[in-house]
Image (tube, rainbow, N blue to C red):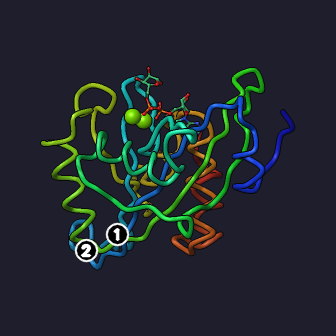
Amino acid sequence: MASGQLSRAEALACTNCRHACHVMLYCDTQNKLFGEIPIKHIILMQMRFDGLLGFPGGFVNPSEESLEEGLSRELLEEIGVVVPISVENHVQSCPDEDVDTRLILHFYAKKMKEEQILEIERSAASTAIDHGHEVLGMVRVPLYRTEGGGLSSFLSHSFIGTARQQLLDCLLRFGLISPQTLCHALSISVA
Ligand code: APR
Ligand code: MG
Ligand code: MG
C-alpha cells in the first residue's frame, strides 16, 4: 500500500484493509494550574493496556458500520459515554507505517464543552467496560511549561503508532498552542 494521506473514499475503497478510528476529544478551559498557569485546553488521551499513550478509539469494520458509527461504539466501550462522531470531525486517513498490516488509520477531532469532557473523565473511570482492561485511565495533555517539564516531559513518553504526531498536528491545526511554544517543547523533549 502506498504511504501518505488518503481521502476517506480512497481509504474505504480498500476492501481487504483493516480500519481503525481514533479521536482527539478536547475543550477550552479557564482553569489555572496552581491558580496561576493557564491550562487553556483539556485534551484527552489514554494510558493503554500496553503501557503506551494513545487516543480513544479502535478497530472498525466498514462492512458492518460506518467509520463514525464504529468510532462511537469504541468510545462507548472505552470512555463509557455516547459521543456522536460525524464526517465533519474527520481530520485525516493514512496507511499504517507498517505496510504489512494493511491497516488504515483514521483520525478525528471533536471540540466539546468543558462539562462534557469532565463527564467523560468521570464515566471513563467508573462505567466504561474497558476501564482497567484495554484502558488503564484517561490522561490530560499538559500544554504549558513548568520548571520540571510540562508538555516537553509529556512528549517524552512512549506513544502508540502515530499518536504523538497526530497530537502535534492537531495542536497546530486547531491553534491550541503557538508554533513557538511547541518548538520549545520539542527542543527539550527526549523522544
Ligand atoms: N496512531 C496509530 N495507530 C494507532 C493509534 C494511533 N493513535 N492508536 C491505535 N493504533 C493502532 C494500534 O496499534 C492497533 O493496531 O490501531 C490499532 C487498533 O487500535 P486499538 O485502539 O488498540 O484497538 P481496539 O479495537 O480499541 O482494541 C482491540 O486490539 O490492540 C489489540 O488486543 C488488543 O484488545 C485490543 C484489541
Ligand atoms: Mg477498544
Ligand atoms: Mg482502543
**Amino acid type, callout 2:** Asn
Total residue callouts: 2
User: Does the CB distance between marks 2 and 1 fall below 8 Å?
Assistant: yes
* Residue named by callout 2: 31
Q: Residue at x 30, y 74 (%)?
A: 113
**Amino acid type, callout 1:** Ile
**Picture coordinates of residue 16, whole percent (x, y):** 71, 29
**Picture coordinates of residue 143, whole percent (x, y):** 44, 62
Q: Earlier in the sequence, mark 2 or mark 1?
A: 2
Can you tell which quarter of the image residue 55 is in? top left
- Front-most of residues 125 and 13: 13
* Residue named by callout 1: 39
Image quadrant of ligand 3? Answer: top left
Q: In which quarter of the image is the C terminus?
A: top right
**Picture coordinates of residue 2, whole percent (x, y):** 87, 37
Q: In this view, does 95 lie above or below 35?
A: above
Q: Which residue is drawn at 21% across and 40% down?
A: 128
Indicate the secondary structure of the residue bearing disc 2. loop
Q: Which residue is drawn at 59% across and 73% down?
A: 178
